Image (cartoon, helix red, strand yellow):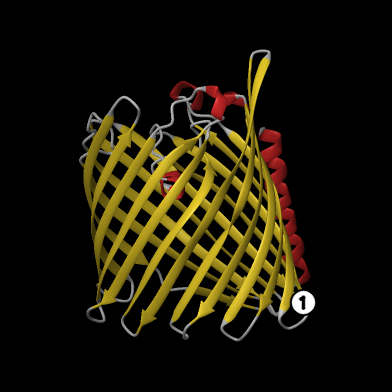
Amino acid sequence: MAGQRLLIAGVIVSSLLSLIGREADAAEWSAEPSLSIKGEYNSNLTLSRTPGEVWGHWVSPSVRFAGSTERLEVSGKAAGDFITYYGDQNRSLTNLFFPVTARYSSEQDQFSLDSSFTRDNTLRSELQQTGAILSFTQRNLWSINPSWTRAITERFSFQLGYQYQNIAYENGRRLGLSDYDVHGGNLGLSYKLTERDDVRLTGSYSKVDLPDAGLKIGNAGAVLSVTHAFSEATTFSAFGGPKWIDQTLRFGSGSLSDRQVIWSFGGSMRTKWMDGQASLEANRDVNVSGLGVLVRTDRLVASISKEFTETVTVSFAGQVFFVELVPVQSAGIQVVQTRVITATPTATWKLNDWWSLEASYTYAHRLTDAADAIDINRGHSTFLKLTYVMPKLSISR
C-alpha cells in the first residue's frame, strides 16, 4: 500500500513538473500565507449518548499558491490544523491539506489534473459528504483525478476522466472501520443549447474494495444534468440518473451477492447581489463509508450571507441529512436510519486589510431510528477565530 501511494505521489509530481517545465517562460507565480488561531467549545463532540464536552484550541498555518502562463494554470494550498482538546477527550490532532490543481489548454483540448493528500478526522469531511457519524478518529485520503476535455465544436465537447482514492483510518480495525480503495472512470458529453443553457450526459463506472469488511462493490451509472442561468447573478442546475449497484460480501469460504438500482438526483439554486449571496441545494446520492457498507444520503443545504458594512459580514448555514445504510440485502445487517440537523450562524469582522475576527455557533441534532430503539443526541459548539493574511507575494519572469 505504501508503494502504491508513493507511485501516486510520483505521478502527481512528475506530471506537474513536466507541464511546468514546458511553460517555464513568461510565468507568473503568487503565494498568500495566512495564520489562524481558534478557541472552541463543544458540548457533545461526537453527538453520542455520552456527551463528550471539550474545550480546544487550533493553530492553522496555510499558504495558497498559484501560477499561470499562456496555456498552463496551477493552483493549490498547503495547510495544517494543530488541534488540542481538553475535557472529556484529552487528545491532540494534526490535520493536513495538500490539494493541487493543474490545467493545460490548447485550442481544442484541456488536460486537467486534480490531486490531493488530506489528513483529517471522520467528523469533518466524511460527515459533510455522507452525513454518517463514525467513530472519532483520523483518516488519510489520497486522491488523483486526471481528465481530458476536447471541444468538438463551439457548443459540443466530451470529457474522459479517471478517479482514484485511497482511504485509511487510524486504528480503523479496532474501531470497526474499513480502509478502502476506489478506482473509477467516466465519459461525459456536453452541449451548450443557448448562451444560458447547458446539458450534460455522463456515464461512469467505479470499483470499490473494502478488504477488512470482505466487501467489493461495482457501481455503474448514468447522469443527465442541466444548467440554466436566469441572469449573471442567478443560476439553477439539476441532475438525475440510475446507479446499478453490484455488491459481493465474502466471509470464510462463502459469499453473498446483491444487485439493485438506486436513483441519484438533485438540484441547486444560487444567487448573489451587491452585498450578499444565497444558495439552496438538495440531492440524493450513494457513497462508500468506512462503516464497511454503502450509505444512501438525502441532503438539504441552505446558506445565506450579507455584508452589513464594509467590515462586517453575517451568514447562516443549515444542513439536514437523512442517512440509510445500503447493505447486501441477504446479509442480515440491521438497516439503521439516521437524521442529522445542523444550524450555524456566523459573524465575521474585517479588522483591517490583514486581520479578521470570526465568531460562530453551531447547533447539532442527531436522531438514530433502529428497529428496537430511537436514540436522540444533541450538541452545541462555538468558536472564536483570529486570522492574519499576509500581503500576496508575486513573482514574474
Q: Is residue 46 visible?
A: no
How many numbered discs? Answer: 1
Q: Quadrant of residue 240?
A: bottom right
On-image quarter of the C terminus: bottom right
User: 85 or 303, which lies in front?
Assistant: 303
Residue 4 horizontal/vertical position (percent)? 70, 38
Disc 1 element: loop
Q: Is residue 146 above or below residue 229?
A: above
On-image quarter of the N terminus: top right
Q: Quadrant of residue 372?
A: top left
Amino acid type at circle 1 is: Ser
For label 1, count other residues whose C-alpha is less than 10 Å away and answer few (under 14), some (14-19) or many (20+): few
Residue 162 horizontal/vertical position (percent)? 71, 53
Residue 351 horizontal/vertical position (percent)? 25, 73
Q: Is residue 225 visible?
A: yes
Q: Is residue 80 above or below residue 293?
A: below
Q: Quadrant of residue 251?
A: top right
Residue 191 horizontal/vertical position (percent)? 68, 76
Q: Is residue 282 above or below residue 304?
A: above
Q: Is residue 193 left or right of residue 291?
A: right
Q: Is residue 353 left or right of residue 79?
A: left
User: 90 or 129, which lies in front?
Assistant: 129
Q: Is residue 182 left or right of residue 289?
A: right
Q: Which residue is label 1 attached to?
A: 106
Q: Is residue 131 left or right of residue 78?
A: left
Which residue is drawn at the image coordinates 27% and 60% (left, top)? 386
Which residue is drawn at the image coordinates 49% and 60% (left, top)? 266
Which residue is drawn at the image coordinates 32% and 35% (left, top)? 368
